[in-house]
Amino acid sequence: MKIATWNVNSIRTRLTHVQDWLQEAAVDVLCLQETKVMDDSFPIAAFTEIGYHPHIFGQKSYNGVAIVSRSPLDNVQLGFAAVLGESVAELDEQKRVIGGTIDGIRIVNLYVPNGSSVGSDKYTYKLRWLEVLRSYLSALLEQPEPLLVCGDFNVAPDDIDIHDPTGREKMVMATDLERQALQQAIADLGLSDAFRKFTPEAGHFSWWDYRAAAFRRNLGWRIDHIYLTPDLYDRAINCTIDPAPRKRDQPSDHTPVIVEL
């Protein structure tokens, strides 16, 4: 089974890119972030006509997540509140979390807040969001299904995940508090980074700024991740970043990450 994650930065703008890539990559499941469209305007037919079933949790102009899969997902849940209850429902006003089960694997697709700038209200919101994520994943890990968590995490876990980590302590997406929050929500719960199982060295990125010819110069960050519970980690036979879509005209600033089980 091949499962991928991709922040498409508007599904309607990048629809042809996604359709083409799905037919080339032949993944079984694709988790999308920043779809930026309400559910009733999501291009469902564009996916069904090429053999995929969309499951969507959208928002106009901002955020939005979706999972498209060759077989329909079971037990689709939208947002944190579907697992944790109404006490966290306000966090679901921003559509950032969707989960479902396929072939006995629970897949969670996330779009973690960016945080804007260190010390801002959005930065504080991001840290709280990651704290709630820990509770959410802890609850899911009590279930018998193996768990795969993927998406745009907007955090570079280590210095090797940034083309130039100089001064990263003051950079949003790389501060100590963000890294600690990510570790508490992921590694401390026993989930492992699939990409690093196969590629331990620096120089591999999933996001490049549109400015300063960043992609051509490979001035990127690795902020799109796939995390696995130990049973799935043992089953992983490859995990790669595909830079090809970033080379297209008017691309997303992110590119897909794919794990094969």
Image (cartoon, grey):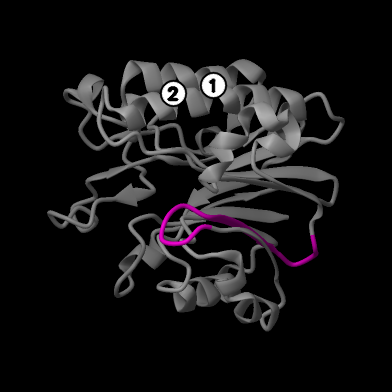
Query: Residue 148 falls in which quadrant of the image?
Result: top right
- Indicate left or right for 33 with 206 as reference: right
Q: Is residue 84 above or below residue 114?
A: above
- Horizontal placement of 27 versus 249: left or right? right
The chief SS type of the magenta part is loop
Q: Pointer 2 and pointer 1: residues touching (CB < 8 Å)? A: yes
Using the numbered discs, state the Cα–Cα distance from disc 2 to disc 1 in whole angstroms.
6 Å
The amino acid beneath tag 1 is Glu
Residue found at x 74% / y 67%: 70
Residue toward you, 166 or 10 = 10
Amino acid marked by disc 2: Leu
Give the residue number, with chain letter if any, for mark 1.
131
Q: Which residues are magenta?
A: 59-72
Question: Horizontally, is 143 left or right of 85 in the view?
Answer: right
Locate residue 249, reporting x and y percent.
Answer: 30, 75
Q: Residue at x 38, y 33 (%)?
A: 201
Which residue carries the number 2 mark?
A: 127
Q: x%, y% of residue 191?
A: 64, 26
In the rendered image, the residue lying farthest to the left is 212
